[in-house]
Image (cartoon, rainbow, N blue to C red):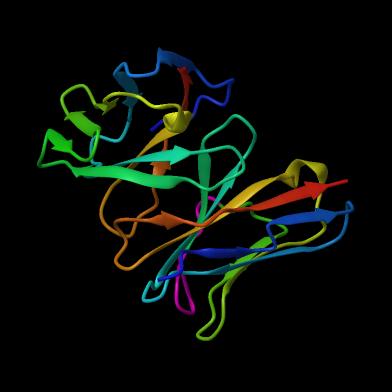
Amino acid sequence: GESVGLHLPTLSVQEGDNSIINCAYSNSASDYFIWYKQESGKGPQFIIDIRSNMDKRQGQRVTVLLNKTVKHLSLQIAATQPGDSAVYFCADQHDAGNMLTFGGGTRLMVKP
Amino acid sequence: NAGVMQNPRHLVRRRGQEARLRCSPMKGHSHVYWYRQLPEEGLKFMVYLQKENIIDESGMPKERFSAEFPKEGPSILRIQQVVRGDSAAYFCASSPSGNTIYFGEGSWLTVV
């Protein structure tokens, strides 16, 4: 991921709608990708991960899509709920044990 | 299984004092990472440690910052002679194998 160091972009959705959060990464050698959710005053919470040998992985209400050709990652949240309101970060890693590189984050706001 | 434990959660230091942040990884995790987060920004890697060894400290400032993960006890991030620019949230993370990485709730340092 690439941190832009500016005010976070914000995605505002209506409760019940689907949300799509996008992320670009820069290291073509990255082989492991994670999405984290961070609520105010708390640490990043693991949501879902995907390895580079896959292009899609589904969890409970969440789906991660990986496009290695354009180095793009997305997180889809189905039936977004107020509790989903948070900042979402993608992170990528090259080889197990190496550092995670975080993207700049997207703030998701869910309107009731 | 308790999560990654960090303390103190909040720390206030005057300029020139020392700050010590502690991190106890999850049980069975031998990989520890420290990250720093400024408001409205992503997490920036600082250092990666395994028991008694620093594996990667490429994100650590050259002066005043140090980290250790002794054979017994928590990992410590130490900041000497703190300055206002050190004010940030410091997150510790741990992993059993270097892949799935779990974060603690963070330590918020305020330098006055």
Magenta segment boundaries in residue numbering: B49-59
The residue drawn where x is 37% and y is 47% is: A46
Asked whether, in this view, residue A109 is left or right of residue B40, the answer is left
Q: Give coordinates of residue A25: x percent, y percent.
A: 32, 30
Give x and y (percent) for residue A66. Answer: 19, 30
Q: Is residue B95 magenta?
A: no
Residue A33 seen in render: no
Q: Position of residue B29 (x, y in %)?
A: 38, 72
| Residue B25 placement, left or right of A33 | right
Q: Is residue B5 left or right of residue A96?
A: right
In the image, is residue A97 above or below residue A33? Answer: below
Of the 4 image quadrants, the one containing the N terminus of chain A is top left
Q: Which residue appears farthest toward the front when viewing the image?
A: A112
Q: Residue furthest bottom?
A: B72
Q: Residue at x 39, y 18 (%)?
A: A15
Total numbered labels placed on residues in the image: 0
Q: Quadrant of residue B78?
A: bottom right
Q: Position of residue A74 (x, y in %)?
A: 27, 26
Please tell me which residue is depicted at 80% across the width and 63% down the height of the picture. B18
- Which residue is at a point 48% across and 20% down the rendered structure image? A109
| Residue B66 in which image quadrant | bottom right
Residue B57 on the magenta span: yes
**Is residue B107 at all visible to an observer of this figure?**
yes
Q: Is residue B78 above or below residue A70?
A: below
Work out whether residue A6 or residue B63 is closer to the camera in this orientation and state it: A6
Q: Is residue B41 left or right of residue A12?
A: right
Judge by depth and name the residue closer to the eye, A110 or B29.
Answer: A110
Depth check: B78 or A90 in front? A90
Identify which residue, A39 or B18, lies in the foreground.
A39
Depicted A12 relative to depicted A43: above or below: above
